[in-house]
Image (spheres, rainbow, N blue to C red):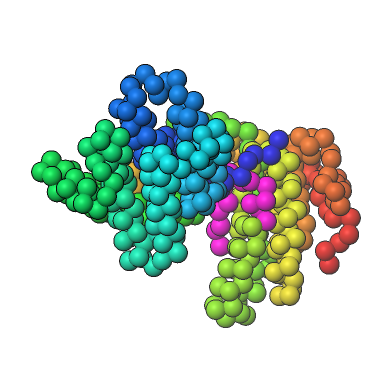
Amino acid sequence: MPMSDPRHKLDRLLNDRLEGTRIQAFWHELLTQSGHILILKLLTDAVLTGPLSIFVDLGDWIFTIGISIQAVCLSQFKINSVWGNFIGVGIYTLIDWPLDGADFWNDPSHQVFWLFTTIVAGLQWLQRHGDTTVARLGLIAENLTRSLLVLAFYIVVSQADGQLTLTPNGFWRFFWADRHEFLVWSGIGIGLLLGMQAVQIQTQRQQIRQTTNILRDLAAWGMGDYAVTTAMSDPSALELQRRDRAIVFMDIRSFTGWCEVTSPDQIAILLDRYYQQVEAAANTMNPLKVSFTGDEVMAIYATPHQAIGAACAMQMAAHAILARHKLGAGCGIHWGKTIEGLFGGDRTRTYTTIGDTVNTAKRIEGKAAAHTIVVSDSVYHAVNGDAPTGYQFRERSPEVMKGKAEPLVLWQLQPQTKLL
């Protein structure tokens, strides 16, 4: 069974580490964004009608469910956060408005959460579409708005208790009363401080993401996506251990002679294109690692099926690059026991696999002429002799290999339509 894409797994793992899991993202959205209006509305209802009322009031349950749905949508799905702010209040309004009739819009708490939801949505729109300065100012203003939401619901409670008359003069006396003056300015001050803190946190998170992307690429280039993902999720899995692996080697034939009559710039350009195209082909079958040494490519796979599929794709990619220079690559595959893990010292280490299987795969590659793929008998039997669509196996004469007591039975995997 093919493995899932290592790059996708690595990106998902890094995203979970930076942004949190889906459950963590839900609670973060509920506690830091969507839940603000819910908490203050419930507190307002508890003060006005008693703490137990919020457990039996249908409207409070509807609002709680609506805000919870909003938190799920904004944390789990790619929903525009500007319009996502209206999910909770929208659900509540669509259900409660028909029940309350015209009195729904006469309720000050309903007016407050619609007003503040609209303001927050507008400020988030500025953050998404403005330049850096506008986005930061919008973030500060959003936090100030959320802080003043406390004051807004306090006004709702005060008006219901008869402490506030909704007239210009009544507002003036209310706000400049000693204890209310403190509430107003402390709300503004805390909102501004929280906004500036949010800007700082956002900037640091962006820097962390940028640094993480750089380190991810550097680590993946040197170690491979599989090794980096494994090191993050289960470091003990990279300890030296025996594994069954399929090894693919590919090498350009007559490359040394071609280099003798070709400028270094042309050689570098050809190799760079060769690496890019062959690596992309190798990655179609999710290798554990792909490495380059000169004009040689080595790829490690979990199964022979993956290795064969990759070798066919690599050979096609190599042909597209090399044929115009009258060059071709030979490819060899072997399957068997290896020792796999992190090898190296304290400062320089690499993930790879070693052993007789690797050495034999290299020897088999040496027996492959340009434009051909040669596999060992163990590979042939591991896939039950089933060649990929458009290819067929042809048994070759046993080959004597350096370091082997007995000749090796080899098979040539060749396209039913020749490349050349």
Taking the magenta stretch, the answer to whether it contains residue 96 is: no
In the foreground, 205 or 408:
205
Asked if one can make out residue 341 in the rendered structure from this viewpoint, the answer is no
Q: Is residue 367 left or right of residue 203?
A: right
> Who is closer to the viewer here, 383 or 120?
120
Residue 395 or residue 181, whichever sits in front: 181
Query: Within the magenta stretch, is there residue 285?
Result: yes
Quadrant of image for the C terminus: bottom right
Q: Residue at x 71, y 35 (%)?
A: 1
Part of the protein shown in magenta: 281-295
x and y percentages locating residue 199 in the rendered image? 30, 55
Q: Residue at x 54, y 49 (%)?
A: 79
- x, y (%) of residue 415? 85, 55
Question: In the image, residue 164 lies at what x, y percent?
Answer: 24, 41
**273 over 279 or under it: above or below:** below
How many marks can you see? 0
**Residue 319: where, in percent of width, then height?**
74, 65
Q: Is residue 414 left or right of residue 108?
A: right
Q: Residue furthest left?
A: 178
Q: Quadrant of residue 52?
A: top left
| Residue beneath the point at 73% across and 58% down | 315
- Residue 280 visible from this viewpoint: yes
Q: Is residue 168 above or below residue 17?
A: below
At horizontal 83% and vertical 44% (from top left) the residue drawn is: 387
